Amino acid sequence: MATGTEHVPVLLQPALDELAIAAGDIAVDGTYGRGGHSRALLERLGPHGRLVVVDQDPEAIAHARAHLGDDLRVTIWPGSFAELGRMARETGCLGRVRALLLDLGVSSPQLDTPERGFSFREDGPLDMRMDPTKGDSAASWLARANEADITRVIKDYGEERHARRIARSIIMARAEAPLERTAQLAAIVARAAGPSPADRHPATRTFQAIRIHVNNELGALDQALTQAVEILAPGGRMAVISFHSLEDRRVKQFIRRQSSPPPASRRLPVAPDFTPQLKSVGGLIRPTAAEEAANPRARSACLRVAEKLEVGT
């Protein structure tokens, strides 16, 4: 059961402003969570607008049905944002979306519910799946992964400099007893990693890395970005809020690839044809000091916005 911590949408006002929503538009909230962004989107869409809410977490979908299910403007689509194209075809909004919002990472309710296994703050089953009905849990993956794979995940996705030492400790610990609880893993990582900055638990990077791997979060993001171009109407905008440097880098590079021709190469005497699909809208947007003070989870948030170009522009 959740602890009752209120979910506070991050970078809400900047995202709404940059999406430039008009009354009557079609919008997609690709990461419903607990509906903070969705409710704000609906206010701007007016009585004749339409909102499609997407989430792979069954608890989020249940929340959407309970709170927005009676709103005729809202279509609730259970699934991953990695399937935006299928969603758009099934809901009849392919190429018609004027505003797409993706708020990456885990939501506050997911973090604050020990039974989901995302956090080391309270003991719970070592799960970490966004959709607990699909795929392997963190415990299942750690039970069979070899040391090299665990090291790679922790190093690449957590940017943890003690990745090899932590992986070796996990292998040794699981030989003595199955790793099934978040407290178990947190203790193992803390002993292996040693002291960390006062404002960060030693297991933070490792938990983050395993969660990203278990949910294929970076792969899903790559798929979502590609399909976003397909579902947007010309002039439509997408706003992506990320909380991890690997995510933000992917978003930045994707927008650049879709808006600028590849750099010239001496091996290619004739530059390949290039038709831009997107243009970047503004630069990187970060939370204000006031928002960070009011909501500590906003500290690492990054917002990037892009607009789909008209054909031939």
Image: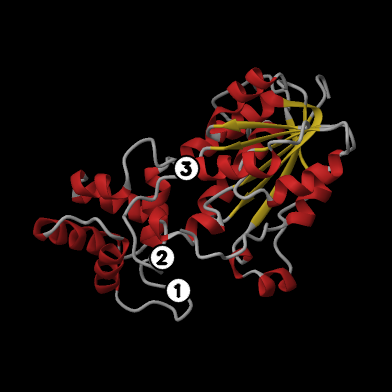
Closer to the N terminus: mark 3 or mark 2?
2
x 34%, y 55%: residue: 154
- Badge 3 crowding class, 10 Å Cα cut-off, few under 14, some 14 to 19, many 20 or more, is some
Q: Estimate the x, y position of residue 24 in percent, counting from the top left.
A: 88, 32
Mark 3 or mark 1, which is nearer the start of the sequence? 1
Residue 223 appears in which quarter of the rendering?
Answer: top right
Q: Residues within 10 Å of mark 2 (few under 14, many from 20)?
A: some
Residue situated in front as seen by the camera: 191 or 109: 109
Front residue of 104 and 160: 104
Going by the picture, which residue comes out furthest to the left? Answer: 176
Identity of the amino acid at label 2?
Thr
**Amino acid found under the numbered disc labelled 1:** Arg
Do callouts 1 and 3 mark residues in contact (Cβ within 8 Å)?
no
Residue at image mark 2? 204
* Residue 176 placement (x, y as % from top left): 9, 60
Q: Is residue 60 above or below residue 117?
A: above
Q: Are marks 2 and 1 in contact (CB under 8 Å)?
A: yes
> In this view of the protein, which residue sits in the foreground, 223 or 142?
142
Residue 296: give x, y in percent of width and height.
Answer: 61, 70
Amino acid type at mark 3: Glu
Q: Which residue is mark 1?
A: 200
Q: Is residue 170 left or right of residue 282?
A: left
Q: CA distance from mark 3 to mark 2?
A: 17 Å
**Image: 92 above or below 39:** above
Please, what secondary structure does the residue beneath circle 1 have?
loop
